Image (spheres, helix red, strand yellow):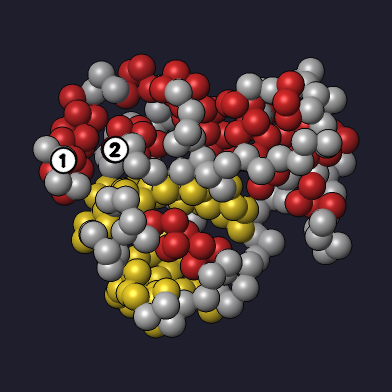
């Protein structure tokens, strides 16, 4: 499998303090890869380097064979907070990124309706953010990234602030969207169980300065149904293995 994203010896410093050091990894087309690591190890920074949102001082990061020097329309980014504009309804918030980019192609009515249905937001197109639940706002945020039709979806712990039940429901939605569209997804998360449930591979990072210390392939059957997958003994084995690597077991 050819690499869509390639990192070779990437490093980052902030104010002379080393945050990331010698980060190397390859992520292939249609892979779902999660990044785990202790707080402050540079997971979110790494995702921003891949996205071209933050410059790096060492090594190389390539997207489709070209050096990453700036954000690409072929990468969608989902932040930790939903960042919706309160005066726009769901439909206009979904199209916000497209409308702000003169080069972006606006989805037609049928494509937009399909996206709304995929996100489980049919009937809420005219609702404003304050009229939506937290989970629905995060679905709109994912939709903002998907509306541009990116090849890669980068997600910086988008469900971290949600309650466990809403988080589980959104994990199911994310699984369904990925299994339908098979985009390349890179997800930063603190949840070991979430990483095992969703991923093809899990990259485990060290304490700061962060580097990748383990690349764990998750060999669980797909398509995955959370209730069935969690009952698979191998699921528990992966959780224990990753917990040990993270120093929590």
Picture residue at 79% right of the left edge, 18% below the top: 123
The answer to whether one can see residue 146 in this image is no
**Which residue is rendered at x = 43% and y = 29% of the image?**
223
Which of the two discs, 2 and 1, labels the residue nearer the N terminus? 2
Left or right, residue 75 beside residue 241: right
Q: Secondary structure at mark 1?
A: loop
How many other residues sit within 10 Å of disc 1, few (<14), some (14-19) or many (≥20)? few
Quadrant of image for the N terminus: bottom left
**Left or right for 49, reference 193:** right
Tell whether label 1 touches label 2 (CB within 8 Å): yes
| Mark 2–mark 1 distance (CA, rounded to whole Å) | 10 Å
Tell me, yes or no, if residue 81 can be seen here: yes
Residue under numbered circle 2? 192
Question: Is residue 137 placed above or below 70 in the rendered structure?
Answer: above
Residue 94 in picture, x, y percent from top left: 76, 40
Q: Nearer the viewer, residue 19 or 240?
A: 19
Name the image quarter holding residue 108: top right
Q: Quadrant of residue 9?
A: bottom left
Up-down: is 239 above or below 40? above
* Above/below status of 69 relative to 193: below
Location of residue 130 in the rendering, given as x and y in whole percent from the top left corner: 73, 26
Residue 17 rendering spot, x and y as whole percentages: 34, 75
Against 17, residue 205 (above or below) is above
Q: Which SS class for mark 2?
A: helix
Mark 1, residue position: 248
């Amino acid at each position: 499998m050819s690499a869509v994203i390639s990192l070779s010896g990437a490093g980052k410093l902030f104010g002379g303090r080393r945050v990331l050091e010698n980060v190397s990894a390859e992520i292939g087309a249609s892979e779902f890869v999660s990044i785990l690591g202790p707080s402050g190890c540079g997971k979110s920074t790494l995702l921003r380097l891949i996205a071209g949102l933050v410059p790096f001082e060492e090594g190389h990061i390539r997207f489709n064979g070209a050096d990453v020097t700036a954000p690409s329309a072929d990468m969608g980014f989902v932040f930790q907070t939903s960042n919706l504009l309160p005066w726009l309804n769901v439909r206009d918030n979904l199209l916000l990124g497209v409308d702000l980019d003169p080069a972006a192609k606006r989805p037609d009515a049928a494509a937009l309706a399909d996206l709304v249905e995929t996100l489980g937001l049919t009937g809420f197109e005219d609702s404003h953010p304050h009229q939506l639940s937290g989970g629905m706002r995060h679905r709109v945020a994912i939709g903002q990234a998907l509306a541009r039709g990116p090849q890669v979806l980068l997600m910086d712990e988008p469900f971290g602030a949600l309650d466990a039940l809403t988080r589980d429901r959104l994990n199911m939605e994310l699984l369904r969207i990925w299994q339908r569209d098979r985009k390349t997804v890179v997800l930063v998360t603190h949840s070991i169980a979430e990483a095992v449930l969703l991923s093809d591979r899990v990259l485990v990072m060290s304490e700061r300065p962060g580097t990748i210390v383990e690349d764990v392939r998750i060999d669980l059957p797909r398509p995955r149904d959370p209730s069935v997958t969690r009952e698979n003994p191998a699921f528990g084995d992966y959780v224990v293995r990753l917990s040990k690597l993270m120093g929590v077991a």
